[in-house]
Image (cartoon, rainbow, N blue to C red):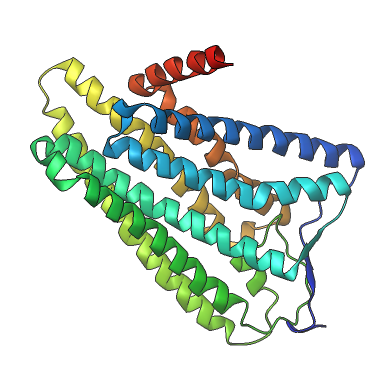
Amino acid sequence: MSNSSSITHFLLLPLPGTRLLQLLHFWLFLAIYLAALLGNGLIISTIAWDHHLHTPMYFFLLNLALLDLGAISTTVPKSMANSLWDTRDISYAGCVLQLFFFIFLMSAEYFLLTIMSYDRYVAICRPLHYETLLGSRVCLHLAAAVWACGFLHALLHTANTFSLPLCQGNVVEQFFCEIPQILKLSCSTSYLRELWLLLASDCLSFVCFMFIVVSYVQIFRAVLRIPSQQGRHKAFATCLPHLAVVSLFLSTAFFAYLKPSSISSPSLDLVVSVLYSVVPPAVNPLTYSLRNQELKAALSKLIPGCFQKQ
């Protein structure tokens, strides 16, 4: 038995036992990580380089790419290093920072996806007021609010989680530090305080979810009233990537945190956590670029230009 003052490090979820499987885990995570770096890096570079993409939709997409890069960089490199060096250790300070940045970036991404649904609602349902409702100053304020809310949300949860006495050992049954696994190490009834905070976060998440749902109900109603098939296709093309990203993010995250304890197991928890924390940052750039003709055209201009300069 130990308490939080004597814990100097945590032990993350043990990786597959054989050396071959550990190396396979390393190479798989490396491929996903490089794909996320390349995809999000290209989106950030393209939007920053092409002035035709300096619109609210692409401004928010640039912020999404930044958040995705940060989120996957918070968890995957440490897991890769542990696989390569055959260890499970993460320092106490490293665990605190990992949990803080993961909550910060993931919650900010959820808030940003909510703002992006509002952007699509205004663009399709109130196009004449688009520049008024989403001018450059408004977009900057919304983006700042997203990052600030994510930061405060993470600071509150991290400070509260690690203020609890930990006397159930130092084994974290996950490949990165997250709140539910840290709470399992607490032996104090004060962990109920963090559960209340999580409940409040769930209520906020539900409000954001309902806002997204209502926005898309209005969007689909407006799109179906468009007389031309080409107009409907263009409107859907701008909404479907965002809807796909939201669906992947919410379905995996909700299942990870709301699944019944009766079906919970370390292997299932590992798979689900990979689905909501590792896969979306790598898949999101592909989702947004597949059906976006403007983004693909800008990419085709940027990449040959880079090769010419070289």
Horizontal and vertical percent for residue 73? 62, 47
Residue 192 vs 45, above or below: the answer is below
For residue 305, side relative to residue 211 (left or right): right
Question: Looking at the figure, which quarter contains the N terminus?
Answer: bottom right
Residue at position x 40%, y 28% in the image: 49
For residue 113, side relative to residue 189 (left or right): left
Residue occupying the far bottom of the picture: 189
Q: How many marks?
A: 0
Task: Give the camera-side residue of 250 and 286.
Answer: 286
Residue at position x 51%, y 44% in the image: 68
For residue 111, side relative to residue 274 (left or right): left
Horizontal and vertical percent for residue 198? 48, 71
Residue 188 vs 57, above or below: the answer is below
Q: Is residue 221 visible?
A: no
Residue at position x 43%, y 25% in the image: 289
- Residue 84 falls in image quadrant: top right
Task: Give the camera-side residue of 178 and 149.
Answer: 149
Residue at position x 38%, y 22% in the image: 291
Q: Is residue 92 visible?
A: yes
Residue 262 vs 109, above or below: the answer is below
Question: Looking at the figure, which quarter contains the C terminus?
Answer: top right
Task: Give the camera-side residue of 206 and 160.
Answer: 160
For residue 155, side relative to residue 120 (left or right): right
Residue occupying the far right of the picture: 19
Residue 18 vs 102, above or below: the answer is above
Horizontal and vertical percent for residue 96? 65, 68
Horizontal and vertical percent for residue 154? 50, 66
